[in-house]
Image (cartoon, helix red, strand yellow):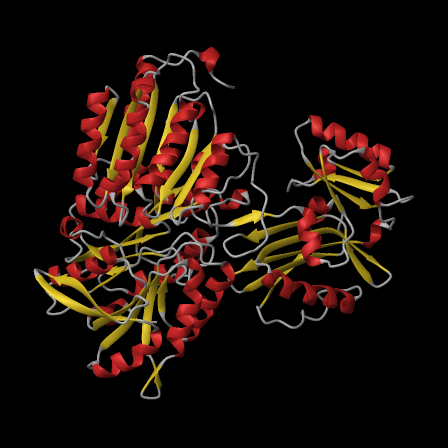
Amino acid sequence: MSRVKLSEYTAKKTLFPNYQGLPLTSSAPLSSLTQAFPRKPLVIKVDEGIKKRHKQGLLKLACTPKEAFVALSTWSTLGYSHFLLEPFLKHDASNEHYLSLERVRAGWKLSYSPQGGVEIESAWDSVKSIILPPDAKTTPPGFFQTSPSVFHRFLFRLLPLMNQFHLSFLEINPLVLQKNHLIPLDLACELDNTASPLSGLPDHKLSASEHQIATLDALTPASLKFRLLNPSGHIWMILSGGGASLVLADEVADLGLGSELANYGEYSGAPLPDDVYAYTKIILSQLLLVKDSAPKALVIAGGVANFTDVALTFRGLIRALAEQMVELKKANVQVFVRRGGPHEIQGLTSMRTFLRQAGLLGSVHGHETMLTAIISEVKQYLSVNPAPNSRRRP
Amino acid sequence: MISLRELRSSRHQIIVLGNHEPIIQSLLDFDYLSGKKASSVLAILTGRRGVAKYFFGRQEILLPTLASLQALPALVSSFPSSPGCHLWFLNLLSGRRTLFSLQELSSLSVKNLPLDLVGGAIFAENVPELHALEILRAATAKQQLVVGPASVGLLVPGVLKLGAIGGITPEQIKENQIMTPGHFAVLSASGGMTNELINLVNLAGHHLSFALSFGGDRFPVLSPREAFLLAEADPQTTAVLYYGELGGEDEYELVKLKEAGLFTKKLLAHIAGTVTSLFPSAPQFGHAKAKADSTRTTALAKRKVLAAAGFDVSSSFADFIHLLANL
């Protein structure tokens, strides 16, 4: 798939064998905070891959266990659920450095500034970047001006671990230099989750339907993606292909229908009819939760497939639609289809026949119709009997 | 790296790693419909030694299948290839097996000479970044033309079909007219959109000079930059249709090429991903590279920079078709 964020706890535990932090959830009792690092001042922070925690008040420094517990409880009521407790390190702000590593085509992009800390954005000019080849054993002279040997030891111990665990990005800010040691205070890390044994954080809180589809996706060699954008939207999409799905979603936004777009997602990589059936079923149940009587459009669309069999995948789609055809009709749903590829005519013909019989036919098009033309049809359909504004989410 | 001019004047043989019958049959259908005398598929690595039945036109033929790649040298020696015949791989294995299979392939030798591969295509998504970079370094050292990972392949009309590109049924191949050479190149980050663009070229009454998908991964072996240079150097190509997405800096590379006078041909681009504005935070789309980490790599920023450099850039997909009609 792609790069995903790691929790700070997992990243530190993976990269620094002596790391002492304690991961906590919302239900952590006060006692677990008091017993963790006795008599030491503490740091508590939200650990959900969020940037600029300090500026958002999601990080509290030099606090007592009780104060940390209060912060944790407050953040829990805001919807956060994962936290990290660490002993507070007293240090001089002038010892705060910035270091980041990103895997790039030519090796590693290494960025460094001796002026790390929360104000790094305003000191961005002080950040120097170089590309290290994958087999680099050293950095150019003068790149690390203070304690270069300490930084080298730190850096060249990290790089093999980054490879071993397929980590693609690491940002440490601040990185504190104290008594010839480098201590990472706050850290962000991304993982190439195609290969790693570590598990990453989702990029947002998953809804129930998103969670179901993520589970389904993990069980099939094909790709099934679903993101719920607006549960009360009136445009629902079952799209195929990573590129075509993007072009179709762009068109919805470009035609000013963004607020009506309920979801984004795609299936690709020749899924079996059963996969498509299960995928469609989950999306339809989410669609049928929209309780207003306004017309709703279900867009089943994709490019001209190279190898995904249209007739086969449509078999799964039709089965799921048929199971819910009465409810869909009642919910004022019409289905708009555009698809091309292997066995296109068979697939489109069965779809058209089914939709007509079920009273759900918006339109059905093949490869000769422009990819995004159905979005204009959807706009037309929705505007004839527009959704009541009061039901729309802002 | 082999040029398109040289590619068109050579004959080609393909070693297929992995068993995907419809794709393999489509290579044979393409050969047959292009008027070739014989199939370009040399052997298929299936994990089982024997033969597999395929059709060349209406005639049933048997293609050798291999239990392991170690059996390949003997097979290659028994088919003495004439000069000017190029050897390609088509890797249809899963993402985890891609690197190891290619390492094994490149370790083989025939009569004490390493197997002389000019390039290949990698189909799998989910090739780990580190593996893709190793494949990239090996291919660069050997100057091979390798498309992928996550690529539907490389297509040179009438000459070479390396992958599912252009379709897998005889109907698709005929309808897309991918046997007939023309003057428009299609370069795309997405497999599905490669075929969508091939379809558009055909509907607009034109033919392809070549088409390829570099794939939507972070580290495509053949970079978009190199693909643009291939198109520039190809005397048959008069215009390039390019499909790109949010994420990555490839469009800035293209602008640099133009400014340096290294890319001078007509180029029509569609950069997808304006829908991002509807999301509260930068989302990850279907392709691994499709995530805008900064405003610089959003679809809108990249459209703007391409247009400023003098390329034809569409504001919507309908606009792309409109601009294509005027090419």
Q: Image quarter for residue A356?
A: top left
- In the rendered view, would you say A224 is above or below B181? above
Viewer-proximal residue, A353 or B130? A353
Task: Please name whichever residue, A29 or B212, is drawn nearer the observer in this view of the structure.
Answer: A29
Is residue B166 at least partly visible in the picture?
Answer: yes
- Image coordinates for residue A99, horizontal then vertical, percent: 70, 56
Residue nearer the viewer, A366 or B177: A366
Residue situated in front as seen by the camera: A85 or A244: A85
Q: Is residue B290 above or below residue A229?
A: below
Q: Is residue B127 above or below residue A204?
A: below
Left or right of B173 in this view: A121: right
The residue sitting at 45% across, 23% down in the picture is A259
Q: Is residue A205 left or right of residue A53?
A: left
Q: Is residue B28 left or right of residue B195?
A: left
Q: Is residue B195 above or below residue B101?
A: above
Task: Indicate the position of residue A324 as horizontal and vertical percent values.
Answer: 33, 23
Q: Residue at x 50, y 19 (%)?
A: A393
Q: Is residue A376 visible?
A: no
Q: Which image quarter holds the N terminus of chain B? A: bottom left
- Residue B181: % across, % down: 17, 59
Q: Residue furthest right?
A: A39
**Which image quadrant for residue B141?**
bottom left
Question: In x, y percent, where is residue A13?
Answer: 70, 54
